[in-house]
Amino acid sequence: MSSPQPPYDDIEALISAAHHQCGGVAYRIVRNYADAEDAVQSACIKVLEKWPEVNGFSTAGRQRAYLLRAVRNEALQILRKRKRWKEQDLGESGDPGIPERLAELARDAKALRIALKVIDEMPAVRQRVVKLWLNNRGYGEIAALQNISVSTARSHISNARKHLRRAMPGDWEGE
Amino acid sequence: MKKGTSTGSFRGGDILDWIYQQGARRDEEVPEFDVEKTLRLVRAVRAIDARGHDPTNFWSQLGVAERGDVVSAASKQTFPRGTTLMREGEQAGNVMIILDGWTEVSVSAEGQERVIARRGPGDLIGEHGAPPVGLRSATVVTVEEVLALVITTEDFAAIISDHPSMHDMVKQQAYDRQTS
């Protein structure tokens, strides 16, 4: 197992490494380029303000996670601001799309957290098979990479589905 | 779509397919963002900070919380050289904090434009136009490419009401500018 990447000693290195991912996080929330760019830039300035603290994190992964959280918070703030504008413009009717979108994001984020935790707790081989599958690898390729048969690879994915279905909270299913 | 069938929320579908689709959508849809623009912004803020605390410089006087609110409320815009950012007598819709580049501030007198000041990194401009005044007291033109935080007057007023110390800074700045 590889050791974690040491922390970036300069914020510009962190931003350069994580910028595309930051853009992705913001874009998926606000769904337009200009606002996503604004969210990323705001987050980067805020992380700069906190750099003495962030610089002391033990790994690059923690620094990246902190930046991504800042981006997400900025993007959500833009979404809330849009909602306020809509409410002012449209009166009490508002725009039902934005609160629904916020709720959907929160619900999806929670589901994703739970699911990824469940995957991380799977037996090592199954975990690797699932991660390869999620990275768009075919069953044949997964089998070759893991030195298992194709049917075993399929079986791991099938069992992972069942495991996940059982592990997810009841109110997340069948709606 | 290679894997799975559902496209939206994972509800009613398979959680593994849904996770995959989150990743697939991520790869397909996200446009490329200009990292150099972001780095330029960060470098500009660092350059102002490197000069240390300056009682005449608006940005350098702001605390972390105040900066955070300003940054969140602002759009970050770049203006080419020769752009009129504000025009004397016009209705004001925003204030700006310059992060990089220089501008000239002028007023009209007897039909002539007279340059009265230069404003650059860290300076707040357009605050005279913020409510309740509402009208620009001077014209501001960029003399080189300028990078600025642009904040609507309403948002600026809201930030000031949340941070009363900023109100004092703006008042002090206005006083200093009038008496310098």
Image (cartoon, rainbow, N blue to C red):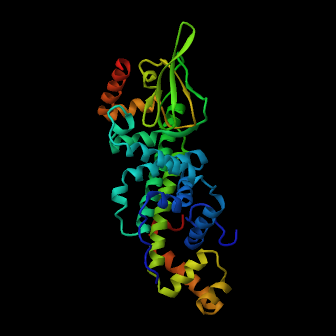
In terms of depth relative to the viewer, which is nearer, B50 or B20?
B50
x, y percent for residue B14: 58, 71
Residue at 56% in and 65% down: B10
Q: Percent from the top left, x then y, of residue A162?
A: 53, 80
Task: In the rendered view, tell whether residue A56 sits above or below residue A44.
Answer: below
**Snapshot quadrant of residue A156:** bottom right
Q: Quadrant of residue B174?
A: top left
Toward the top, the furthest residue is B110
Say left or right for A124 vs B55: right
Quadrant in the picture for the C terminus of chain B: top left
Q: In the image, is residue B81 above or below residue A80?
A: above
**Residue A168 in view (yes/no):** no
Q: Look at the image and tell me in which quarter the N terminus of chain B lies.
A: bottom right
Front in this rendered view, residue A10 or A60 = A10
The foreground one among B102 and B15 is B102
- Tell me: residue B43, above or below residue A171: above
Residue B98: x and y in percent read 47, 35
Residue closest to the far right: B1
Residue drawn at x 63%, y 62% is: B25
**What residue sits 36% from the left and 53% below the top?**
A50
Query: In the displayed structure, does residue A144 sit left or right of residue A161?
Result: right
Total count of labels = 0
Is residue B87 visible in the rendered structure shown here?
A: yes
Q: Residue B17's spot in the image, x, y percent?
A: 60, 71
**In the image, what residue occupies the spot 53% across and 36% down?**
A86
